[in-house]
Image (cartoon, coloured by chain):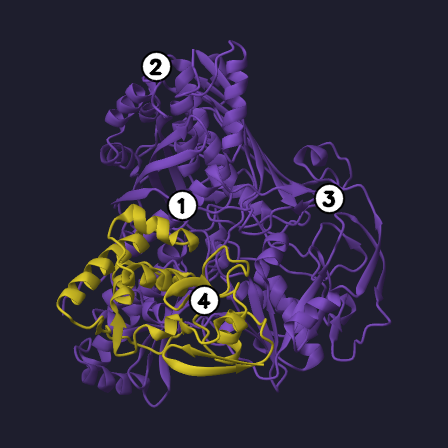
Chain colours: A purple, B yellow
Amino acid sequence: MRMRIVGTSAQRKEGIFKLRGQALYVDDYKLKNCLYGATLRSAIAFGRIKKIEFDPDYSWQNFIVVTAKDIPGKNCVTLIEQDQPLLAEERVLHPMEPIVLVAHSLRSKAYEALNHIKVEYEAHDPVLTIEDSLAKKQILRRPDNVFKRYEINKGNIKEGFTKADFIVEGEYRAPHQEQAYIENNGVSAWVENDGTIVARGSLQCPYYVHKALKIIFNLPDDKIRVIQAATGGGFGGKEEYPSMLAGHAALLALKSGRPVKMIYDRHEDMLATTKRHPAIIRHKTGLAKDGKLTAQDIEIIMDAGAYITLSPVVLSRGTLHATGPYECPNVRVRSRAVATNSPPNGAFRGFGAPQTLFAAELHMEKLAQKAGIDSLELRRRNIFKTGSKTATGQVLKESVGISRAMKECAGISRYARIKKECDRWNKNTNNPTWRGIGMALAFHGGGFTGSGEVMLASRAAVALTKGGKIEVLAASTEIGQGATTIFAQIAAQALGVPYEWVEVAVPDTGRVPNSGPTVASRTTMIIGGLVRRAALQLKDEFIGKAKAVPKTRAALIKAAKLLCKGKSEVRFEVQFEKPGEIVWDEAAYKGDAYGVFSYGAVVVELEVDKLTYEVRLRNFFSAQDIGKAVNPLLAQGQIMGGSAQALGWALFENAVYKDGVMQNANFTDYLIPTALDTPAMKIKIIEEPYSHGPFGAKGLGEMPADIPVPAVAAAVYHATGLWFGELPILPEKICHEMLNRYSHNSLSPCGRGQGEG
Amino acid sequence: MVVKFVVNSKKRAYKGPPFKRLIDVLRDDFGLTGTKEGCGEGECGACTVLIDGQPVNSCLVPVGQVENCKVETVESLGSSAELHILQKAFLEEGSAQCGFCTPGMLMTSLAWIRNGGSDKSQEIREYLAGNLCRCTGYQHIINAVIGAVREYKKAKARRKGLFLPSPRVSGERAG
């Protein structure tokens, strides 16, 4: 039986449930006798907790109250380190840090009670900016406030600059970004009769929560169970925080003996949970007359917030992508993640790379402009080819689709022609707008960095039940990206059975093996590969014991009885195996940083209103090399969705902070793109297969968020002649820069009707 | 206080405080959890339902205000046997990713096609601008609505039903 399901736009597995309003998200489950939890949070950024007072006139009898003293195990949210407490005890390190939990059978009462708890602090002067942290205004992390630093060296940076004909410097600033999944964070928890603690929630990484809960409750593996509910978006925002939230809900459940739901509202979610790391990135680049890079000296500083959480790995990915997809003989990248008294920053699609690629790509434009070379030509002369050596010395042996991506993207966008049209349009001062076009390129490593995948040792399985059900068992979560569909397609193709025969189990640590977290563009490439291997084992078993892979349902049921031998199911479980040729030196930060990179190009066409300085996106194009699109429709959806998020960060999303507290923590004041703000998009998928990916597939999920921002900034430069190295590019910033520029020659910056010149 | 109204063609009587939000009445009192809360302040549109045919954020409506009204939620669309043309279009165009904005998105789109909205993408984008989606970048949603508008017009011209057979679903995964 020959069947091709990989490479087709198979229907989303859980699609019908979502379209009928039947998919059950965490708050949709009815829990009998349920309490609702609420969190009292730190009102100051930094200080000592002197006293917690409960209003003696308030009736507390129907409330469950939990403080750090109620934690049976260790008071920490385990991630890379154990420095973040589950509930603050003696000191607070950031605003919104959880201190007390209360629960009540009415949600509104639980929140009302928070007003009757008074915390007395001894406040210290907080460290709120990267600059203050580096100046050691206070020491939050010994010895110098630096959580983590990396240095990459290639060639000789000094020599590189002596060979340069042009040297260009630039500083770029990337701000916070809120993930803004439409479903807020939420977890429910209860305790089973045998003492097992169960948490069910909106989450990306069931085994991260599992690991954290074991330590909080001091319980063995089998006494903690974590189940994923349908999840309304993650984008990294549900990678780490659910561990905190599950700990809180479970503490209340344990003390009350009742199920507890903790569902944040939008305001609380935006105030308290993680965001993209703000970063300062400085480039100094040497370029020879022939348009070849001679030296790249890059410095990165990220604001980690108050605890280390995931910052070392975010910084790592940012560092490894800081050069852009260009080969340069002499490179130095130095990076640091520093402590401040703001809520910890965390994972967000791209994971450090969008910050550093914004800088790298806008800097490339600047370089082109200074050297008088067309920016596309400059890129062409330096981009990675098969055999190129990256900054860590990784030789790109296969699947290097960047030249194709660039060419295709320039083609579908008619880049050269539109550029000329914009120039013509801009010459006519009567036109109400300035128009521009910009391009940017990306590379993005798939899977965990360096030895990360080896250490994770992920597992996944395919099971056959005696009733004839074929089921994929993995902890990778469906968060909208299409994991269940992709897994079913891969398993069906490997087995040679219809797609409809394959089901994908709900990620439940009581049932599925540990496939590691659902992050890092690794689900298709790494776990999909495991699913394929497991399915092939089942196929062998079919052939060995039932002579052939069944072709009909009846044959499947017969074969299932044969294979299961009276047991309820037979499982084929496999573990990640490192491709032999990958070598990584963590200490020197040299070698194969990733198994393979994906590549992409983006072109943005926009116009700037001469009266209001608003930027209107006219068209968006992207070509991305992802090895193999297992499901082209889902792949396009990923590319367009990730791109829209980045466009929001470029133009609208402005998280305003005061004293470490987000001031616009709601959708009225923190604007994410609507259907009107988002341009029509045209996507071209390029398939340069990767020999170790399932059916050639590489990573996809994150790269779309990497480069729309520098493409927008380049297009704004083309339209207005202004560089914006700091995001978002708001109308008021454009207005300010225009007024600055024109104040020197008394010309009005405005066009039509404003009496220009 | 008792508030009487119709939800998905079924007569309902709600007993309780009249200022309770319609979304909470739908979800908690009637068990219609298809309607989602994304922001609670009328910005995201995830909680959109139709009140007398008009799309409204149910998080902003006190239940007392829908006395004698006709309320429609996502649960009124399609059944396990057949899908509404909008649902079919959303499924085929890949318009639902995480699915959380989907019920609201469907209800606003339903109002658009019922009220004779056009198949012009810019007009559809304008009409859907009150429904936020963070997953799709909107293109696949717009594509689906364009397709559904055309199907709807064809179906009306032929006086055919608006429901199409539901594709077969394997498994019981509702999550």
Which residue in the protein does label 4 denote?
A475
Amino acid at pointer 1: Ala
What quarter of the picture does the C terminus of chain A occupy?
top left
Nearest the camera: A744 or A475? Answer: A744
Looking at the rendered structure, the number of numbered marks drawn on it comes to 4
Hey, which quadrant is residue A386 in on the image? top left
Q: Is residue B124 above or below residue A158?
A: below
Position of residue A470 measured from the top left corner of the image (x, y, whole percent): 30, 76
Position of residue A733 measured from the top left corner of the image (x, y, whole percent): 53, 29
Q: Which comes before the other along the chain, label 1 or label 3?
A: 3
Give the Cα distance between marks 2 and 4. 51 Å
Which residue in the protein does label 1 denote?
A644
Q: Which comes before the other along the chain, label 2 or label 1?
A: 2
Q: Which mark is residue A141?
A: 3
The answer to whether marks 2 and 3 sit on the same chain is yes
The answer to whether marks 2 and 1 sit on the same chain is yes
Q: Residues within 10 Å of mark 3 (few under 14, many from 20)?
A: some
Q: Which comes before the other along the chain, label 2 or label 4?
A: 2
Which residue in the protein does label 2 denote?
A290
